[in-house]
Image (tube, rainbow, N blue to C red):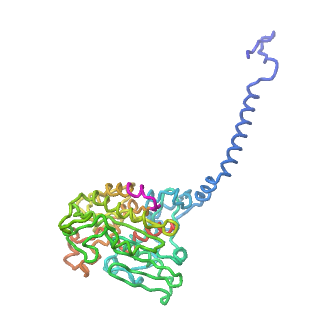
Amino acid sequence: MSIVPSSSGTMKPPRGRPLLPFFIAIVCAFAILVLLYTETITFLSPTSIFKIKSCARKHTVKKSKDKTAENNVYESLVDDRFEFDPEECNVANGKWVFNRSIKPFYSDRSCPYLDRQVSCVKNGRLDSDYRHWEWQPEDCTLPRFNQELALKKLRDKRLLFVGDSLQRGQWQSLVCMVESIIPEDKKSMKRGRSHSVFKAKEYNATIEFYWAPFLVESNSDEHIIGDPKQRILKVDSVSKHAKHWLGVDILVFNTYVWWMSGLRIKSLWGSFSNGEEGYEELDAPVAYRIGLKTWANWVDSTVNPNKTRVFFTTMSPTHTRSEDWNRKGGLKCFNETKPVMKKKHWGTGSDKRIMSVVNSVVGKMKVPITFLNVTQISEYRIDAHSSIYTETGGRLLNKEERADPMHHADCIHWCLPGVPDTWNQIFLAHL
């Protein structure tokens, strides 16, 4: 519409009301109506209600009283992470935060069930900072471990950890985290060569461990063969072990470090007329895939998912190469006192080929498997291994061995209390 000049030379607006503002008003009103309608439908949908419950935001401000460098991360930090939901939260994505106010539920002096191998303080470790780091996921808040809640969730149930010495460490960690609130006459422990059982009598609950470092059968199951060259695996059979896994309500499996000797795996399958002499030497990932498929077939053919829940703990990283965290001239994990702070740090002690095999095999299973994804969070913790504060061959390292950490420091197992406590915190959150 044009503007016409008046006879006086001034500009006169045209007759009638302008249409543009009226048109804009109609469009805005329509948009508001659409928005309200969409919000109403979205809010009423079951999926959105589920998400609202699981993703409730926190708008509290946490401030640290401790002004140390480690605790400054708490100052003026707005925590808008949502409450933990296993379907929504990637627990592996986060960071370790130092918090001296966090106290372990036990010590290696207060809990009578710890092996000497992981009792670092009792074995002479003097620094204590490694016990005061808490894992903080980036997207959600991980619930604090609650002893009473854990026992209530296990009431009238059998929980069985199956695997190697790292899995045994997770089992001992969980037992020690809950046992202190149980009266002496209401708990018991029965240790066996392969099968150990802790019982919380008032709850009619057991927390058990079964030794099967490869999950499949081997000649190193009952009497450990120290030389990996002499170990032979029957990669197509779990029956000898699996008879102990029946009637269990919650199964937690792991297998990794025993496969990673750096050697080819002597593997048996089928019926060989010449017995153990009929093995084939396979690359570790190949043998691991065959063995894990054997385990997966047993789970799918035997486990009723309506009665038994199955977990798989991902590989626990080793820290035997200090160059992985740019410590040139370092002695493996010896004398490390802080976690690696580089985001997504990944060292040579975690084999991605094995992780790929696990994802592939578990992804094709019929029975649902819940991953306890501990690999990335543990990768950072070069400071938390038992190092020289451990035992070998049933005795503590002597003075000469402690003086030679390159050959004697244990950078595979974890001090307890320590990192496996966080694994169990994640485990309880999944329960």
Is residue 78 visible to the viewer in this orientation of the structure?
Answer: no
> Which quadrant would residue 153 be assigned to in this image?
bottom right
Q: Is residue 227 magenta?
A: no
Please name whichever residue, 48 or 332, is drawn nearer the observer in this view of the structure.
48
Q: Give the number of callouts.
A: 0
> Which quadrant would residue 223 be assigned to in this image?
bottom left
User: In the visual, does 130 lie left or right of 398?
Assistant: right
Please name whichever residue, 411 or 248, is drawn nearer the observer in this view of the structure.
248
Please name whichever residue, 166 or 409, is drawn nearer the observer in this view of the structure.
166
User: In the visual, does 271 lie left or right of 215?
Assistant: left
User: In the visual, does 95 lie left or right of 203?
Assistant: left
- Compared with residue 251, is residue 111 higher up or lower down, i.e. above or below? below
Rendered residue at 24%/72% (across/down): 219
Which residue sits furthest bottom? 185
Rendered residue at 64%/55% (across/down): 49
Coordinates of residue 422 in the picture (x, y in percent): 44, 68
Coordinates of residue 35 in the picture (x, y in percent): 69, 42
- Compared with residue 154, is residue 13 higher up or lower down, i.e. above or below? above
What segment carries the magenta color?
360-370
Rendered residue at 55%/62% (across/down): 62
